Amino acid sequence: MLAPPVVSGGAIHVVMSAMGADPSIALFLSVVVGLLTLVLAFLLVRPSVLRIRRKKE
């Protein structure tokens, strides 16, 4: 469940570090992108969960 946000955030951290960016900025951006990915995944999953609950009732 947490693998995609960690991978996408980690990839940005590696790219920013390779470009010579400040490590703290790269870390901040990687955390932000990881959280955004997690929220997006949750929003994509949640409607299907709600539909399943309605069908069972």
Image: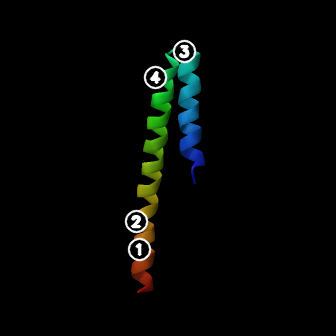
Badge 4 marks a residue whose secondary structure is helix
Instruction: Give coordinates of residue 28: x percent, y percent.
Output: 46, 29
Q: Quarter-wise, where is residue 36 in the image? A: top left
Above or below: residue 44 compared with residue 57: above
Chain-order first, disc 1 or disc 4: 4
Tell me the number on the disc at residue 51.
Answer: 1
Say what amino acid the circle numbered 2 marks: Pro
Badge 3 amino acid: Met
Label whose residue precedes the other's in the sequence (3 or 1): 3
Q: How is the image coloured?
A: rainbow
Question: Pointer 2: what residue?
Answer: 47
> How far apart are the alpha carbons under marks 3 and 1?
45 Å
Horizontally, is 17 left or right of 56 in the view? right
Secondary structure category for the residue under label 1: helix
Dot 3 or dot 4: first in sequence order is 3
The tag earlier along the polypeptide, 4 or 2, is: 4
Disc 3 or disc 4, which is closer to the eye? 4
Q: Quadrant of the N terminus?
A: bottom right
Q: Are marks 2 and 1 in contact (CB under 8 Å)?
A: yes
Measure the C-alpha gap from mark 2 to mark 1.
Answer: 6 Å
10 Å crowding of disc 1: few (<14), some (14-19), many (20+): few
Of the residues shown, which amino acid type is indicated by label 4? Ile
Q: Which residue is disc 4 drawn over?
A: 25
